[in-house]
Image (cartoon, rainbow, N blue to C red):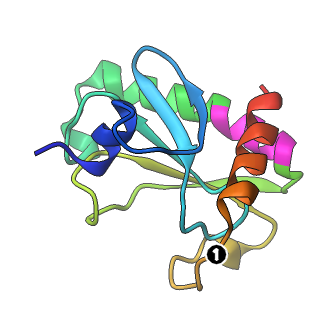
Amino acid sequence: MASVFTKIINRDIPAHIVAEDDHYLAFLDIMPLTRGHTLVVPKVEVDYIFDLDDKTLTGLHAFSKKVASAIRKATSCKRVAVAVLGLEVPHAHVHLIPMNQMNDANFANPKLKLSSEELSSIAAQIRDSF
């Protein structure tokens, strides 16, 4: 069965997409740690990031770098944290988390509850920052 990320890639379920190319997709986390928290996924469905072939893995990081630059411009954060976690979805992914202090990237923090309208606005701001 397809992962939830594959369903987003295939547009079977909606997402607040901020960037896409032929191989990767970036979309907002719907339960973000901070405003602009974005997930970046390869379009190929592979569970574990280090099971990706080298070309896909390096491409994922290069694509993430472009997205992080747009996030930083859009959110005026000090840095964009990068985290590779993810036992909850069997699809390799990278978290890009805008941060102004170290604790902003702590996954034990309560998640923000943003409306669809707020998420749409944030996604547009990131897209406009490319």
The extreme top residue here reads 22
89 shown above or below 47: below
Q: Nearer the viewer, residue 71 or 124?
A: 124
The reply to whether the magenta stretch includes residue 109 is: no
Q: Amino acid at mark 1?
A: Lys
Question: 58 left or right of 86?
Answer: right
Q: Which quadrant holds residue 51?
A: top left
Say whether residue 81 is visible.
yes
Residue 129 position, x and y percent, is 82, 31
Label 1 residue SS: loop
Q: Residue at x 32, y 18 (%)?
A: 55
Say whether residue 42 is visible.
no
Of the 4 image quadrants, the one containing the N terminus is top left
Q: Which quadrant holds residue 9?
A: top left
Q: Which residues are magenta?
A: 67-74
Residue 34 position, x and y percent, is 69, 67
Residue on which the image places disc 1: 113
Q: Residue at x 74, y 43 (%)?
A: 71
Residue 42 position, x and y percent, is 36, 31
Question: 71 left or right of 77?
Answer: left
Q: Nearer the viewer, residue 130 or 53?
A: 130
Q: Residue at x 39, y 33 (%)?
A: 11
Residue 94 position, x and y percent, is 45, 48
